[in-house]
Structure formats: structure tokens, C-alpha cells
């Protein structure tokens, strides 16, 4: 069993770094999508990630053995590939139509779907604290979107409703990837799995992407695209390193703060750059709801670590 170093201050700093980067990600993606389409942005993110991870593994001589991809292992890898690939694309489809704050709150359903999937697939069970956390999460989700009820219920094919639907699909496909990855970790390391997913997804998305769109980007577009491409690599690296110094349950609890970072960052952006992106309308119930979502997610993660060996990776793509 892996033993943490006990340097909790470093673990906390690395966890907060991940939270900050993933909290800013949907805001940057929203800006990039003003100049590029969702599939092309995703293609660049996968391609850059594949290059970085390949170089890292080549230096450490840990290139995965592709001959292992047969039988059940091959099927699980296909689920992981199509699950994460679809998650990245669906997430951006959603971000195109809703605010970054709504996107970040809605995508928190992903780890919940993963935990619920564990109840069915792996015959795991929730303890009373996990059920309490899950209930708080659901109620918080409803409260957060209280100002959007009329828009959602009266216009099912409206942009906001469609955006939430895409985000829900992104959460479900991420859960499928996470459940498959849990089993694949018996054969491959996390970096090997991610490399196979990145390189395969880059190839899959070629017919639907237009890499030449980068030619028309302005300076801000280039900066935002670079940030989005590097964000996942740096943030995930900080996340993985945090697990080496701090318990997984504590890291997961800190990562649950990500929606609050997005919400607060959007307020700052709206104040200084009011013409950049529309802010999420919020009232007291919305604020209470966002806090309940965070507390519910953190409670479910922490309470479950005593019974489960699942390490919950953040769903932020």
C-alpha cells in the first residue's frame, strides 16, 4: 500500500494549485470557443498532452506495452478511450451554451455517477455519511439552478437547457472512463493509460477537427489555447504529486472546492471585463446551493475513503 510522505503543507499547496487551474479552465475554454470550434480545441488539447506524456514516459522508459491490449483489457481500454474522449468534447459543447460557473457545478455530478456506478458494477456500498453527502449534493444542485427553473422547464430545446444536457452527458461518459480506468490500473500505470487515451483520441478526432483554425487566432486566442492545452498537464501533475504527500481523501475534499473558484473568478472577470463573458445570475439560494454541492461532494469523498480504495480524480477535463 502506498504511504504518503506526511508533508501535508506541500500536499495542500499542490491540491490548491490543481483547484485554481481547474477552476479557471472553463473560463479560458469559453474564450477559446469564441474563435475555434469545440472539436478542434479538444484535438489540440489531446495532441499536446500526448506529446508531453510521451516524452515524460520515454525519458523514464515506461512506454506502455500495447500487446497487453487484448481480451477484457482491450475492451476496458476502449471504454476508457471513448469515455474520456466523449467527455472532453461534450464538456466543451456544454461550455459553449452555458456559463463557466454552471458548467463547473454541473460537472461535479461526474464523480457522483462514478460512485453510483461503483455500487452497481463493483457491488460497493455507501455508508450513512456518504448518503448524507450525496443528499446534500443533490439538494445543492437544485438550489444552485433555482433562478434558471423557468428557462429550463419552459424551453427544453433552448441553449441553456441543451448546454446542461451536454454537461450531463460529459459527466456520465467521464464516470464510464473512471470505472474502466480503475480496473486498468491493475495492468497499466495512470500515465500509460492517459497516453494511450490521448494519442488514440487525437487520431479519432482528426476527421472532425480543423487544426488550421489556429491561423486566424488573435493574441488572446493563442494565449487561451496554450493555457487550456497546458492546464490539464500541469494541474494533473500537481494532483498526482499531492497524492504522494497527502491522503487521497483530503486531496479529494480540497478538489471539491473547484466550483467555488470558478464562481468567484467569474465575478472578478465580470467586474473588470464586463464585455468578455456573461456572468451567472445568482441569488442567496444559488450561493447556498453551490456551498452544499461542495460540502456534499467533499463529504461523500472523505467518508468513502475508509471503505474504498478508489482515488477520485477530478472530472475537470
Image: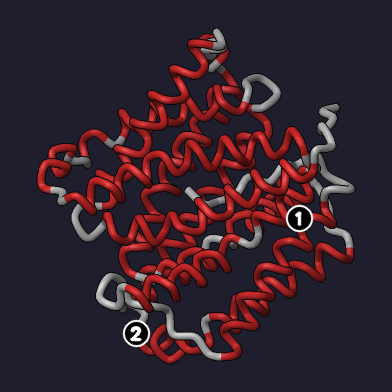
**Residue positioned 30% across, 46% down in the render:** 225
Q: Badge 2: few (under 14), some or many (20 or more) residues near its Cα, within 10 Å?
A: few
Q: Quadrant of residue 302?
A: bottom right
Q: Quadrant of residue 273?
A: bottom left
**Residue positioned 34% across, 74% down in the render:** 272
Q: Badge 1: few (under 14), some or many (20 or more) residues near its Cα, within 10 Å?
A: many
Instruction: Say how many tags the image has.
Output: 2
**Residue positioned 57% across, 35% down in the render:** 237
Q: Secondary structure at mark 1?
A: helix
**Quadrant location of the N terminus?**
top right
Kindly indicate whether the residue at mark 2 contacts the one at mark 1 (C-beta within 8 angstroms). no
Q: Can you see residue 23?
A: yes
Q: Can you see residue 159?
A: no
Q: Residue 229 location, x and y as percent?
A: 37, 40
Vertical comparison of 220 with 50: above or below: below
**N-terminal-most mark, 1 or 2:** 2
Vertical comparison of 215 with 63: above or below: below
Vertical comparison of 146 with 100: above or below: below
**Residue positioned 68% across, 71% down in the render:** 137
Q: Residue 142 location, x and y as percent?
A: 59, 81
> Which is more foreground, mark 1 or mark 2?
1
Q: Which residue is mark 2?
A: 155
Q: Residue 70 location, x and y as percent?
A: 55, 16
**Mark number displayed over residue 301:** 1
**Mark number displayed over residue 279:** none
Q: Secondary structure at mark 2?
A: loop
> What's the CA distance linking mark 1 and mark 2?
35 Å
Q: Quadrant of residue 268?
A: bottom left
Q: Say left or right for 60 vs 204.
A: right
98 or 61, which lies in front? 61
Amino acid at each position: 500500500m502506498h504511504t504518503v510522505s506526511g508533508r501535508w503543507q506541500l500536499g495542500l499547496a499542490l491540491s490548491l494549485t490543481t483547484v485554481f487551474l481547474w477552476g479557471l479552465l472553463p473560463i479560458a475554454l469559453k474564450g477559446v470557443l469564441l474563435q475555434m470550434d469545440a472539436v478542434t480545441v479538444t484535438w489540440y488539447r489531446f495532441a499536446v498532452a500526448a506529446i508531453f506524456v510521451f516524452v515524460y514516459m520515454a525519458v523514464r522508459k515506461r512506454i506502455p506495452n500495447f500487446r497487453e491490449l487484448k481480451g477484457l483489457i482491450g475492451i476496458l481500454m476502449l471504454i476508457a478511450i471513448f469515455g474520456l474522449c466523449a467527455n472532453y468534447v461534450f464538456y466543451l459543447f456544454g461550455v459553449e451554451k452555458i456559463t463557466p460557473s454552471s458548467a463547473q457545478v454541473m460537472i461535479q455530478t461526474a464523480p457522483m455517477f462514478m460512485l453510483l456506478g461503483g455500487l452497481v458494477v463493483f457491488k460497493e456500498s455507501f455508508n450513512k455519511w456518504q448518503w448524507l453527502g450525496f443528499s446534500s449534493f443533490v439538494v445543492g444542485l437544485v438550489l444552485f439552478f433555482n433562478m434558471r427553473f423557468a428557462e429550463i422547464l419552459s424551453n427544453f430545446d433552448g441553449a441553456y437547457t441543451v448546454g446542461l444536457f451536454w454537461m450531463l452527458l460529459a459527466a456520465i461518459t467521464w464516470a464510464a472512463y473512471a470505472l474502466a480506468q480503475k480496473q486498468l490500473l491493475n495492468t497499466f500505470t495512470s500515465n500509460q493509460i492517459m497516453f494511450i487515451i490521448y494519442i488514440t483520441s487525437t487520431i479519432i478526432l482528426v476527421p472532425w477537427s480543423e487544426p488550421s483554425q489556429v491561423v486566424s487566432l488573435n493574441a488572446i486566442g493563442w494565449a487561451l489555447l496554450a493555457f487550456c492545452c497546458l492546464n490539464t498537464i500541469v494541474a494533473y501533475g500537481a494532483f498526482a504529486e499531492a497524492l504522494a504527500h497527502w491522503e487521497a481523501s483530503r486531496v479529494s475534499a480540497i478538489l471539491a472546492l473547484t466550483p467555488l473558484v470558478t464562481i468567484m473568478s467569474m465575478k472578478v472577470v465580470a467586474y473588470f471585463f464586463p464585455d468578455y463573458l456573461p456572468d451567472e445570475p445568482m441569488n442567496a439560494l444559488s450561493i447556498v446551493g453551490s456551498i452544499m454541492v461542495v460540502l456534499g461532494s467533499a463529504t461523500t469523498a472523505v467518508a468513502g475513503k475508509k471503505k474504498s480504495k478508489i482515488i477520485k480524480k477530478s472530472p475537470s477535463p
